[in-house]
Image (cartoon, grey):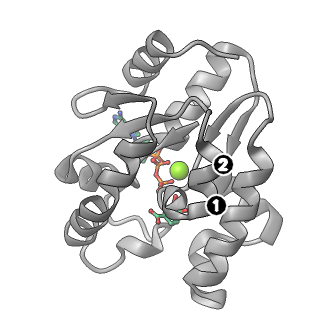
Amino acid sequence: MLIGAPGSGKSAVGALLAERWGVPHHDVDALIEAEVGTTIAEVFATHGEEWFRRVEVETTAATLGRTGVVSLGGGAPLAPATQQALAGEVVVWLQVSVPVAAGRVGLNVARPLLLGNVRGRLMKLLEQRTPVYRSLATHTVDTDGLDPAQVADQVAAAVVVR
Ligand SMILES: Nc1ncnc2c1ncn2[C@@H]1O[C@H](COP(=O)(O)OP(=O)(O)OP(=O)(O)O)[C@@H](O)[C@H]1O
Ligand SMILES: O=C(O)C1=C[C@@H](O)[C@@H](O)[C@H](O)C1
Ligand SMILES: [Mg+2]
């Protein structure tokens, strides 16, 4: 399971790892979009964040126990139910600094929580979430200065696929 901030590379690295290991890739954001039939940004706009978080907890829970690589949503580890569900799993935290994450996500409107002031919003998110990511992670990879393939190499070196 990959956790980390928006722009840490959960989706990109998850896809590379799944390909490398020949296992399915479950990207929870993409699963929610498929389930709901619209984009995450649209879900936030139409139903609000609370509604999204409820769906996210359920969709995340449904991926647990499946074979493969799971890329969680950036905020998913904040939910107590998800924290409990992650206990005993291999959880890799893709660490990223604010300027690097901001550079990667750019002004992408697909990330509703970062709208307005990407750097400022990321700084706030990381302040709140760093302790949570740290407490849940069984492995950590610092992704600053690495491309997605190099991050995947480091994850693969650190964990054993089940
Ligand atoms: N290590 C990296 N080096 C350079 N670019 C990267 C790296 N990891 C990801 N990227 C690029 O940064 C952008 C964001 O990455 P990605 O979508 O994988 O992040 P994410 O963690 O899934 O974010 P979110 O929580 O918003 O889903 C993508 O364009 C991706 O190709
Ligand atoms: O960091 C977050 O809270 C989010 C990250 C994305 O993965 C999406 O799950 C959504 O945009 C919320
Ligand atoms: Mg993603």
- Label 1, secondary structure: give it: helix
The image shows residue 63, relative to residue 32, as above or below, that is: above
Q: Position of residue 20 (x, y in %)?
A: 62, 15
User: In which quadrant of the rendered view does residue 109 lie?
Assistant: bottom left
- In this rendering, would 101 be left or right of 133? left
Residue tagged by mark 2? 85
Residue tagged by mark 1? 81
In the foreground, 118 or 82: 82
- In this rendering, would 83 be left or right of 145? right
In the foreground, 95 or 33: 95
Name the residue at 29% across, 26% down.
146
| Alpha-carbon span between mark 1 and mark 2 | 6 Å
Q: Are marks 1 and 2 in contact (CB under 8 Å)?
A: yes
Q: Position of residue 137 (x, y in %)?
A: 44, 37
Name the residue at 22% across, 29% down.
145
The image shows residue 30, relative to residue 24, as above or below, that is: below
Name the residue at 30% across, 52% down.
130
Q: Amino acid at mark 1?
A: Ala
